[in-house]
Image (cartoon, helix red, strand yellow):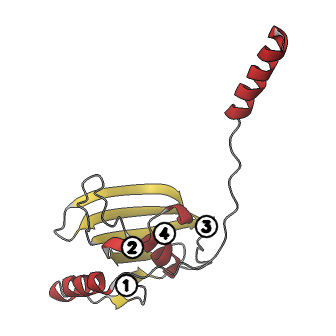
Amino acid sequence: MNKYGFALFAWALIAGSCQQAEKAPCVSAPVTTKAPETEVIALKQFIDSSGIAATADERGFYYVIQSPGSGVKPTICSNVTVNYNGKLTNGKTFDNGSGVNFDLNQLVIGWQEGIPLVAPGGSITLYLPPSLAYGSQEQNGIPANSILVFKIDLTKVE
């Protein structure tokens, strides 16, 4: 290969790698992950001892809908805009955000399962066992195997 051919090949390789990868199409299959029984029992003990009137979901998390919202509920393939506050069971806030956009299929399983229970304008509190949140991996300010509490206001669905 001559020096011009090599330069052209190198340029094409670099230019091709700079293009954004196309977003893979989302498959709208229902989430079927269920929390292990030991986690469900621990979460129920927290709910009961805290006097929280929450609804149990068959997948192993609990929730309280403060407001159902109105309109079309999101699917796993939706982009959602939310205001949220994440806390540990001791009340310590580990994360929060306002007007944050997410592709729902990129979030923890508990959010994928819980957010579609409300429509835009809705508000929900999710009580997630570890396997539907961050599991056995320690995250920024979140100990491994933590039960997490998220207060989520769904403001927009696309």
Q: CA distance from mark 1 to mark 4?
A: 22 Å
Q: Earlier in the sequence, mark 4 or mark 2?
A: 2
Q: Are marks 2 and 1 in contact (CB under 8 Å)?
A: yes
The amino acid marked with disc number 4 is Leu
Q: Residues within 10 Å of mark 3 (few under 14, many from 20)?
A: some
- In the structure shown, which secondary structural element does the residue marked by tag 4 occupy? strand
Distance from label 2 to label 1 (Cα)? 8 Å
Q: CA distance from mark 3 to mark 4?
A: 12 Å
Image coords of residue 12 (percent x, y): 78, 26
Label 3 with label 4: CB-CB less than 8 Å = no
Observer-side mark, 1 or 4, equals: 1
Q: Which residue lies under the disc numbered 4?
A: 154
At label 2, which amino acid type do we have? Answer: Leu
- Mark 3 or mark 1, earlier in chain: 1
Residue depth check, mark 3 versus mark 4: number of the one nearer the observer: 3
Q: Secondary structure at mark 1?
A: loop
Please state which amino acid type lies under the numbered disc 1. Answer: Gly
| Distance between the alpha carbons at the discs numbered 3 and 1 | 23 Å
Q: Which mark is residue 23?
A: none
Contact (Cβ within 8 Å) of mark 2 with mark 3: no
Image-based side of 27 in relation to 93, left or right: right
- Going from N to C along the chain, the mark reached first, 3 or 4, is 3
Q: Which residue is at a point 68% across and 57% down the rendered structure image?
A: 24
Q: Which mark is residue 60?
A: 1
